Image (cartoon, rainbow, N blue to C red):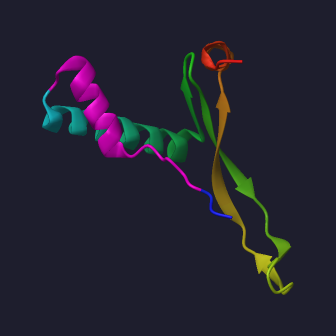
Amino acid sequence: MTISRNNTQKKDIINNIFNELGLPKNYTAKLVDDLITTLISNIINQNIFKVKNFGTFTLKRKTKRMGRNPKNQINHEISERNVVAFKVAAELNKRVNNYVEK
């Protein structure tokens, strides 16, 4: 069984902005880089980044725990780490659900 993914890459976002707004690609690339940098720095410094009508990114701490490799059934410790969680805003969720054909 093969799972295919169609991930959006940064260059796709830059091309979409370029096509929609006609801004120069180097300016658009700088804009996208600045947005990503702002997102990362706010998550690191404040543990949260909210975008109205889009969603909220939060930094959560996961404690260490025991895990098991499903292929060979060997147990190992999964280390303590930070993870970024995203909760979609109600407005975005409503717009996406209205767009999806039923």
Compare residues 75 and 5 and report the one nearer the observer: 5
Q: Residue at x 23, y 39 (%)?
A: 29
Q: Nearer the viewer, residue 13 or 79?
A: 13
Q: Is residue 88 left or right of residue 38?
A: right
Residue at 39 percent of width and 41 percent of height: 36
Which of these two is toward me, 88 or 73? Answer: 73
Residue at 69 percent across and 49 percent down: it is 60
**Magenta region, main secondary structure:** helix
**Placement of 87 over or under 43, stated as above or below:** above
Q: What residue appears at the point 71 percent right and 54 percent down from the top-left corner? A: 61
| Residue bounds of the magenta highlight | 4-23
In the shown orientation, is residue 70 left or right of residue 7?
right
Quarter of the image for residue 98 reads: top right
Q: Give 27 or 4, whichever is nearer the viewer.
A: 4
Q: Where is residue 23? Give x, y as percent.
A: 16, 24
State the image quarter where residue 24 is shown.
top left
Q: Position of residue 35 (x, y in %)?
A: 36, 35
Q: Quadrant of the N terminus?
A: bottom right
Residue that sits furthest to the front in the current view: 1
Horizontally, residue 91 falls left or right of residue 68, namely: left
Looking at the image, is 20 positioned above or below residue 47? above
Decide whether residue 67 is among the magenta residues.
no
